[in-house]
Amino acid sequence: MAAIDTTVPKRRNVLRSDAAQKLLAFAGLIVLFIAFSLASQYFFTFDNVIGILLATAVNGVLALGVTFVIITGGIDLSVGTVMTLSAVMTGVAVTNMGLPIPVGVVVGLLTGALAGFVNGIVISRLKVAPFIATLGMMMIARGLSLVIAQVKPIYFNDTPAFREIMMGSVIAAVIPELNIPNSVFLLFGAAFTAAFILSKTVLGRYTIAIGSNEEATRLSGVNVASWKTAVYTLGGAFSGLAGVMIASRLNSAQPALGAGYELDAIAAVVIGGTSLSGGEGTILGTIIGAFIISTLTNGLRILGVPQEWQMVVTGAIVIFAVYLDIIRRRRN
Amino acid sequence: MSDILVSMEGIDKSFPGVHALDQAHFELQAGEVHALIGENGAGKSTLMKVLAGIYHKDAGHILYQGSEVVIPNPRAAQNLGISMIHQELNLMPHLTLAQNVFIGREPRQGLPFMLAENQLNAQTQALFDSMHLKLDPRTKAADLTVAKQQMVEIAKALSFNSQVLIMDEPTAALTETEIEELFRIIRDLRGRGVGVVYISHRLEELKKISDRITVMRDGRYVDTVQAADVPINRIISMMVGRTIYESAPEVPEETGQPVVLEVKNLNSGASVRNVSFKVRQGEILGFAGLMGAGRTEVARAVFGADPIDSGEIWVEGKPVQIRSPRDAVANGIGYLSEDRKRYGLALGLDVEANIVLAAFRKFLDGSTLVNRTRTRSAAEHYVQALSIKTPNLQQQVKNLSGGNQQKVVIGKWLTADTNVLIFDEPTRGIDVGAKSEIYRLLNELAAQGKAIIMISSELPEILRMSHRIIVMCEGRITGELSASEATQERIMQFATQRGGIVAADAASTAVSFDHSQGRQV
């Protein structure tokens, strides 16, 4: 064995280990699919797989926004109830005020973006810790949803087209055999947009830079406060989109819904390999993470495992995923 | 070289409770390397942070190329052509080198928010080429050594067409070769007419690299001198305004003192291989070597902070099992990390709490309540004995100077009744005046019968302090020298000796080397 040449820096192969983490999540998803397919003949069917995709859509879109926030080293606990508030605002616009559906969609998106913007201002200008700021927003949005909806659901019965946003199938209109609902395409469209923003735009670059070394980013002349606000606003806009999607899916805005969704979203992000300490994370990972959660839920339900136990399993997987990440770091 | 680039006059700056700059003055010419020196707290970094737009001056004028300027933020300074490379490096580890260099002003393509990644990489490559740096712009910053990261920071500064480059302690973490490379680049910059401000504690270096030296003390300007004309001693006395403790090591008369700690054939990971040594009561054993030689790793393994693969540790003639720092402390071994802020101190706690931290158990009434009277008297004792300069025991440790923080760590381990104290770079980041006090303390501790292991990368420090010197290279002990036979040259010879070849005069030492396994052919 030759002596180690200390003049050569020890190269940590970040690329390889990053890829390993992603591969692991992906492999986990494949293993789940195979295991459930073997366990039940009802699992790997067209309808059930579509069901999984459908179940992933809302949580996946929420998780996309949370991914950006977590990469900056922050956290957003308000995405669930902000989603509800956006759904309610869409309901108010479309059902109560009778505005056209596209206007209602924009109202939902703007509601989410506005809530995210407020989060961003409170965090970056008032210097309130993200955990506290978004915890506050979570409660505010929940309260406002109930107030605005007067504690009862707003239905979209007068506008049947609204339900088509999620449950309709543009592709089935062309190829009738391929009855894939729009929600699946909405999810993937949102994911592509998020991936594009993260890797190709200035906002994405600064998202990573802030999470990697906030002070250095500031000293480089980047207006960290503004970009952080932009990141939270983007996160809020994704919550707004999720709000429109869930309202369409349920054909109603349910003002009491939403609490707990933020935790599923954060879980998806974490399972996907995004580091809570900031600086690294991928959209692909988040999407895989979201699929792992909905596949688990779906598969366990088909096997007749009670819902309470499904939560136990999901929780264990979140801890396991983070532990894997810790091992990887230690090796580096 | 008479073009005055920067002239700072009557700069005042106060922080809550501290008058950091008091009528400070500084002048920089084009094409010179201007060293700015002074003890910690003298105001060097503060003055330069004012110039770099990080702090706002309370009063005074800054003239840049002859006209008065206002520098509200770092970006404004960069646009003027003033860049600062900070002591703690400021790269984003998760971004590539190119992304780091052009952060905040990325080239765009198509839409205004779209990044032009190819252009970014090409521009960075051109920049590296102009500096003769062999680096790939697509590498992630985390994958570089500290020295290479520093080169990237310099490249980043140059990409602003900087006329003024401020470097704060640039060599603190570099090896000799890396320092040479850095100096090559600095000289190159000087040749191009850039004014370089060089802040450093390493006085030997200043002679090598700087043209002029400005000395600061207590936030005030002291003097500016030509580097070539003035001996280091005079510079030191200008810095401290008092004489400095200097003495050769007092080697104990007898070597018959009992061995307190013996390490036999220690292996830990790839960086500690077959290390064996003894340290006696009242002895200061110096560990010399280049960065990455495995000295810190030896200390961490002995202290139980890193796992031991094989080998034995004997304390006072008995073999002991050390699996965690807790075991080490129980066996009377204390470790003072080179990074005291991270591993040695609870910065937010006060002096008293830090001093009793490692020995809380001793101050308990019953099993849960801490006896404050006794912790206070213990803390008072060490504040006095170690002459820790603090307004009171309730001062948060983060507000103390580096030297006083180091003393608090020493006090902590003394409270814990340690007999073996391992000092890892005890004077890193500590100014000249406080250094001599730390040296005096080490000698006193040895005289009191403590066994002391001192890891240091500064050869003068090793030579001055050690009774016996062990030199490491690449995880192995490559030589051992007594105080009388040690010279810088001999130490460097061992420190660069690859493959664990053992000192010829091993017979004169108490150390047993394992030739059969340790040797490489």
Image (spheres, coloured by chain):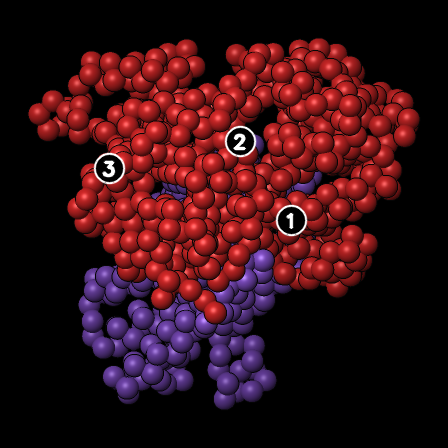
Chain colours: A purple, B red
Q: Which residue is mark 2?
A: B429
Tell which of B465 and B56 is nearer to you: B465
Please state which of residues A268 and B272 is positioned toward the viewer in this rendering.
Answer: B272
Q: Is residue A294 above or below residue B287?
A: below
Chain letter of mark 1 equals: B
Where in the figure is residue B505, as x and y percent of width and height? Answer: 43, 51
Tell me the SS state at disc 2: loop
Does mark 2 fall on the same chain as mark 3? yes
Chain for numbered disc 2: B
Does label 3 or label 1 sit earlier along the sequence? 1
Mark found first going from the N terminus, 3 or 2: 3
The alpha-carbon separation of the residues under discs 3 and 2 comes to: 34 Å
Q: Of the residues shown, which amino acid type is indicated by label 2?
A: Gly
Cα distance between the residues tagged 2 and 1? 19 Å
Residue at which label 1 appears:
B178
Residues at discs 3 and 1 both on one chain: yes
Q: Secondary structure beneath disc 1?
A: helix
Q: Position of residue B387 (x, y in %)?
A: 39, 15
Q: On the image, which quarter does residue B33 sit in?
A: top right
Residue under numbered circle 3: B258
Which of pointers 3 and 1 indicates the residue nearer the eye?
3
